[in-house]
Amino acid sequence: MPHAISIKCQNATAAPILKLWDEASAFEVSGSMAALDYPPHLTLAVFPEHPGRVVDALDEVFAAQPKLTIVFDGVGYFDNDPLVLWARPRPDASLMALHHRLHRHIDPALCDPHYREGNWVPHCSLATRVPRAEATAAMAWAGRKRLDFEVDFDTADLVEFLPVRVERSYRLL
């Protein structure tokens, strides 16, 4: 099963993302993010297979990692089939430094190419199963949507998915 490393929000600052989940789910047959049963998150790495001995690297990377406060300023989309809607974070040096630090410990061949350094687009998914029939309306909504809020990402996880199962968790300071 695939695995991922993510940072998630387990506090009240998640409320604006949860509201966006509700709005974005109007473009889906059923709400994909609520169905995950996993909090709002930013995925830092995805592995098609189990990443092996990544736990030592996670212990090092996340041992003293402070929580990250990320500002979101808009909605983007990945024009896939199905279309994916996501909240766009403002450029953030701390987030990019965390991603870089983590990927120094990961064999790039193990990681999905979209999450490797140089390819990664930081994003917080809002809807992951927007059918083609709703894509035009969803893209128009994304283009109109302006955001200006902060979310405190206070936990890092190694998860197996789907369904999401947390294998290892780190509380960010």
Image: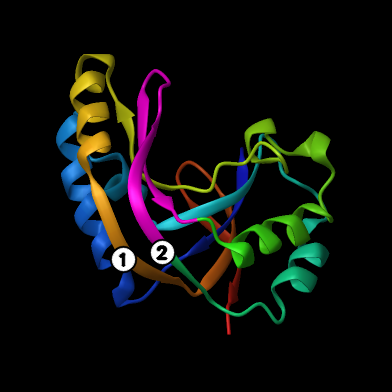
Q: Secondary structure at mark 1?
A: strand
172 sits to left or right of 139? right
Q: Where residue 71 is drawn, which disc sits there?
A: 2
Q: Are marks 2 and 1 in contact (CB under 8 Å)?
A: yes
Distance from Cα at disc 2 to Cα at disc 1: 6 Å
User: Is 47 located above or below residue 136 in the figure?
Assistant: below
Residue 54 in magenta?
Answer: no
Q: Residue at x 47, y 47 (%)?
A: 123
In the rendered image, the vertical position of residue 44 relative to residue 58, given as above or below: above
- From the image, tell me which residue sits under label 1: 149
- Examine the rendered structure and indicate whether residue 26 appears above or below residue 163: above
Kind of residue sitting beneath label 2: Val
Q: Is 160 rendered above or below residue 142?
A: below
Residue appearing at x 21%, y 28% in the figure = 140
Residue 90: percent from the left, percent from the top? 46, 56
The quadrant of the picture occupied by the C terminus is bottom right
SS class, disc 2: strand
Look at the image and name its color scheme: rainbow
Q: Is residue 39 left or right of residue 12?
A: right
Where is residue 144 shown, x and y percent of the image?
A: 21, 39
The front one of 98 and 30 is: 98
- Specify the principal SS of the magenta part: strand
Tag 1: amino acid: Phe
Magenta segment boundaries in residue numbering: 71-90
Q: Determine if residue 17 is in view.
A: no
Q: Dividing the picture into quarters, in which one does residue 76 lie?
A: top left
Residue 114, position as x, y percentages in the image: 63, 34
